[in-house]
Amino acid sequence: MLSVKNLTACYGESTILDQVNLAVAPGQVVCLLGRNGVGKSTFLKSLMGLVNTPQGSIVFDGREMIGDPTYRRARRGIGYVPQGRDIFPQLTVAENLQLGLGMAGGKGAISDKIFSLFPVLKTMLARKGGDLSGGQQQQLAIARALVSKPKLLILDEPTEGIQPSVIKDIGSVIKQLRQEGNITILIVEQYLEFIMTVADYYYVMEKGQIVAEGLTKEINPEEIQKRMAV
């Protein structure tokens, strides 16, 4: 589904990612772990064409994406939820969802499946996004990415600043999507307990490089926590 090889990413003269290799198989939930500032979010932005990637390969669904603009990557089947959610606060929940559908090239009504995953949104369609709580905004952001039925869903720190009850709800959504097997998910996260309940495979990043990987069911929490300690 996704194969990243020898990827380098830069901001100006500064190299942030150095020869990163990562793969996500169809239907998997894969997590990229690491402390703040090691390049995790830059990696996701690289996948979306939002930063300079002078070297390496990003093959998605059998096709090379290096050189493709962001909108083309989205229309090829990638849904991206950035850190901070980036919903449109002055638009209603319904308008945010429709915009997500349109930006990915889709048309028509929002699938009822979205509201079965996030029932709270159905009761808030007329409310402005900016009036929602942080947890509700995160659910809206994920729903907005899902409305176009992407092949790959990318989540950047989905539990950041979210109350435990909503973290549980988001975890349940990820588990349901994984069980259905129609979507592949890549998550950047620091909440190890959450990842151990939802992910199949993990990678650990330090200073822009992958330094560890393995099956989540075989993870050593103490070792990973040491790598993630500030």
Image (tube, rainbow, N blue to C red):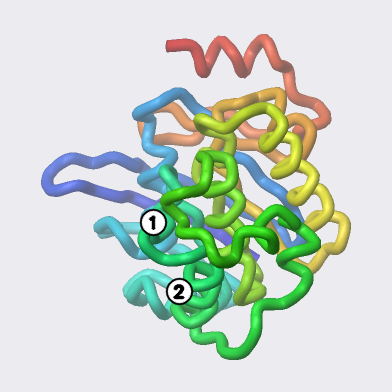
Residue 73 bears which disc, if any? 2
Instruction: Classify mark 2: residues with Cα within 10 Å, few (<14), some (14-19) or many (20+).
Output: some
Label 1 is placed on what type of residue? Answer: Pro
User: Is 72 positioned to the left or the right of 14 in the image?
Assistant: right
Judge whether 122 appears above or below 162 on screen: below
Residue that lies at the very extreme toward the left in this rendered image: 13
Give the distance between the C-alpha atoms of the residues marked 1 and 2, in whole angstroms: 25 Å
Name the residue rendered at 35%, 41% in the picture: 18
Residue 116 bears which disc, if any? none
Nearer to the camera, 7 or 216:
216
User: Is 81 positioned to the left or the right of 50 in the image?
Assistant: right
The quarter of the picture where the C terminus appears is top left
Q: Earlier in the sequence, mark 1 or mark 2?
A: 2
Q: Which residue is mark 1?
A: 89
In which quarter of the view is residue 110 placed? Answer: bottom right
Nearer to the camera, 5 or 215:
215
Is residue 44 visible in this depiction of the protein?
no
Q: Secondary structure at mark 2?
A: helix
Residue that lies at the very extreme toward the right in this rendered image: 179
Is residue 105 visible in this depiction of the protein?
yes
- The spot of residue 108 in percent (x, y) is 61, 89
